[in-house]
Amino acid sequence: MAFIAIAMGSRSSNPQAGTQETGSTAEILRRAMSHRGYLAMSAAFFACGFQLMFITAYLPQYLVICGVSPGTSATALGLIGLGNAVGSYVFGRLGGTFSQKRLLSFIYLSRTATILVFLALPVTQASTLAFAATMGFLWLGVVPLVSSLIGNLFGMRYFNTLFGLTFFSHQVGSFIGAWAGGLSFDLTGSFNTAWTALIVIGISAAMLQWNMDDSKEPGSLVLHREVS
């Protein structure tokens, strides 16, 4: 990765010739914090981190409780990684054709439906691997879609700042997902409460994304360009 970064750093990162985006960091942050669509997307990204970190941290332990062999847990995590590589590419391509906010809503809702089906059926080796493959496909397909939406709304000059803030919401969700999963098990002796939270949060995220306002604000910084 270091060699790739060095190669990328040798390329010019200047704005397009003849144009320059105007506005300060404070201005773009003010616009982002007042954009309801951006805030809704960031809140939904919290759900992404919550769901994924809980599954990563506690799926093996849950499978042991259900009597599934440890080897199946390892295979399931590997399938999640494999499916993630495919899903990220597929949803990135779909985002160039279809509504990105609708695709995000679809991912959150599909994850939640997959969890519901997994919990409703007997937990076996076959059901676990099917769950892992499906969740893997839906795992990080949100990232290219969120990235594209931020670029469309605010341009690319402050993309890293705005994506970083949105990803911070994801990481807070990851922390709470890992912490709350362990806490619920300590208090109740099972993961039922945590699984229920995953379902409720997933449905909420799907609704937030479906109703997201993905229109640019009048006078958005992405439109402020000066001919040099």
Image (cartoon, rainbow, N blue to C red):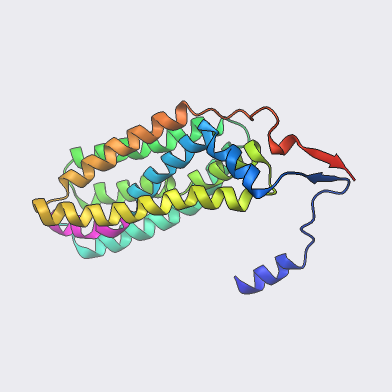
The secondary structure making up most of the magenta span is helix
Q: State the image quarter where residue 107 is shown.
A: top left
Does 225 sit left or right of 188 as displayed?
right
What residue span does the magenta drawing correspond to? 54-66
Number of numbered callouts drawn: 0
Residue 2 or residue 211, whichever sits in front? 211
Q: Residue at x 16, y 51 (%)?
A: 184
Question: Can see residue 149?
Answer: no
Q: Position of residue 102 (x, y in %)?
A: 50, 30
Q: Residue at x 10, y 53 (%)?
A: 187
Would you say residue 169 sits in the magenta stretch?
Answer: no
Task: Locate residue 222 relative to residue 147 in the image: left or right.
Answer: right
Which residue is pictured at 24% across the width and 57% down the height? 58
Q: Nearer the viewer, residue 124 or 184?
A: 184
In the rendered image, residue 145, in percent from the top left (x then y), is placed at 55, 41
118 or 158, nearer to the observer: 158
Q: Is 56 contained in the magenta span?
A: yes
In the visual, does 225 lie left or right of 44?
A: right
- Could you say where residue 14 lies in the image, as x and y percent from the top left? 79, 56
Residue depicted at x 43% and y 48%? 169
Q: Position of residue 95 (x, y in %)?
A: 58, 37
User: In this rendering, is residue 63 above or below 2?
Assistant: above
Residue 15 seen in the current view: yes
Query: For the N terminus, which image quadrant?
Result: bottom right
Vertical order, 3 against 54 (above or below): below
Viewer-closest of 74 and 101: 101
* Left or right: residue 34 compared with residue 183: right
Residue 3 lies, with reference to residue 166, above or below; the image says below
